Image (tube, helix red, strand yellow):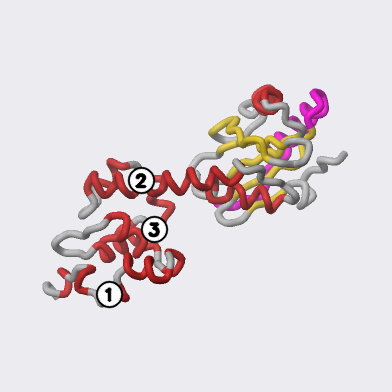
C-alpha cells in the first residue's frame, strides 16, 4: 500500500495523464478531479495530483466548496498550501469573469431561458442573495447587468430608486430583475412577489418597462411571469 500511495501522474500511461488527454481530446472529456490536477500541477509525497484533487473535491463536497472557500482556508488542507490554493482561486475567478462576458457582444434576450443561461453559472453557487437588473435597449439587447443589493431580499433593501438608477444612466428601455436563492430552490416567496410588484409599479411611473423577474437556483431558474406568479403585462 505504501508504494501504491506514492504513484505520480508520470507513472500513468501517457493516454491516462490529464494534460495529455486534454491536448488530445479536449477539456470536456476530463473529470473535475483531472482538471483540478492540471491546475495544481503536483501532488505530494503521499498522493499524486489526481489523488489530491479527488480528496479535495470529495472532502469539500464538490466544486461549490472551492467557490465559497477563501485562499487561507484552502491552503490549510493537507497537500494544498498557499501556492496551490492561489492557483485554484485564480482559475475559479477566470471562469467567473468569462461567464460575465456573455452579454458584452450584444446578447439578445428573447425568452426567460436566455436570462437564465446568461447568469446561471455566475449566480447558482452564491451563498448570499444577490439582486441584479439586466438592462436592455429597445431591441432587447443586453446593455449591462447591474448588482443592486446583496443580502436577504425584501422591499426595504430593494428600493426602486436603486433598481432604476443604472437603467436611467444607461438609457435602458426595459429591465429584467434577477436574484438567486442560495438554498438552490428557485420557488418564489411572498417577498419575491412583493418586490416584483413594487419595482413594476416604479417602472411604470418613470417609463422603464419591467419585463420579468427571474429567480436562479442550483441548475434551474424560474420566471415569475412565465409561471404566473406575477403579471408584468397588466
Q: Residue at x 32, y 55 (%)?
A: 39
Residue 151 placement: quadrant: top right
Q: Position of residue 53 (x, y in %)?
A: 30, 60
Q: Dot 1 corresponds to which residue?
A: 14
Q: Quadrant of residue 161?
A: top right
Are discs 3 and 2 less than 8 Å apart at CB? no
| Residue at the far left in the pictured view | 2
Q: Earlier in the sequence, mark 3 or mark 2?
A: 3
Q: Residues within 10 Å of mark 1 (few under 14, many from 20)?
A: few
| Residue occupying image coordinates x 60% and y 30% | 148
> Which residue lies under the disc numbered 3?
61
Mark found first going from the N terminus, 2 or 1? 1
Q: CA distance from mark 3 to mark 2?
A: 17 Å
Q: Which residues are magenta?
A: 184-208
Q: Quadrant of the C terminus?
A: top right
Q: Nearer the viewer, residue 8 or 189?
A: 8
Instruction: Please tell me how crowded label 3 is: few (under 14), some (14-19), or many (20+) other residues with Cα within 10 Å.
Output: few
Callout 3 secondary element: loop
Residue that extends furthest to the right in the rendered view of this protein: 234
Measured as percent of width and height from the top left, residue 164 is found at 69, 26
Label for residue 89? 2
Q: Is residue 182 visible?
A: no
Amino acid at each position: 500500500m505504501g508504494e501504491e500511495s506514492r504513484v505520480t501522474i508520470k507513472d500513468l500511461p501517457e493516454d491516462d495523464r490529464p494534460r495529455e488527454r486534454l491536448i488530445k481530446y479536449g477539456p470536456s472529456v476530463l473529470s473535475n478531479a483531472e482538471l483540478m490536477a492540471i491546475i495544481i500541477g503536483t501532488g505530494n509525497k503521499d498522493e499524486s495530483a489526481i489523488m489530491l484533487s479527488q480528496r479535495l473535491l470529495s472532502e469539500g463536497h464538490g466544486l461549490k466548496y472551492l467557490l465559497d472557500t477563501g485562499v487561507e482556508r484552502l491552503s490549510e488542507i493537507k497537500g494544498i498550501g498557499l501556492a496551490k490554493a492561489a492557483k485554484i482561486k485564480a482559475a475559479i475567478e477566470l471562469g467567473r469573469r468569462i461567464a460575465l462576458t456573455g452579454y458584452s457582444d450584444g446578447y439578445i434576450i428573447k425568452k426567460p431561458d436566455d436570462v437564465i443561461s446568461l447568469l446561471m453559472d455566475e449566480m447558482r453557487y452564491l451563498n448570499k442573495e444577490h439582486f441584479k437588473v439586466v438592462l436592455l435597449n429597445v431591441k432587447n439587447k443586453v446593455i449591462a447587468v447591474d448588482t443592486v443589493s446583496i443580502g436577504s431580499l425584501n422591499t426595504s433593501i430593494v428600493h426602486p430608486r436603486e433598481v432604476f438608477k443604472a437603467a436611467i444612466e444607461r438609457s435602458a428601455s426595459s429591465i429584467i430583475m434577477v436574484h438567486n436563492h442560495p438554498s438552490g430552490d428557485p420557488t418564489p416567496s411572498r417577498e419575491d412577489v412583493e418586490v416584483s410588484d413594487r419595482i413594476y409599479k416604479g417602472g411604470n411611473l418613470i417609463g422603464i418597462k419591467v419585463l420579468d423577474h427571474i429567480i436562479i437556483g442550483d441548475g434551474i431558474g424560474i420566471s415569475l411571469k412565465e409561471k404566473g406568479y406575477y403579471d408584468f403585462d397588466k
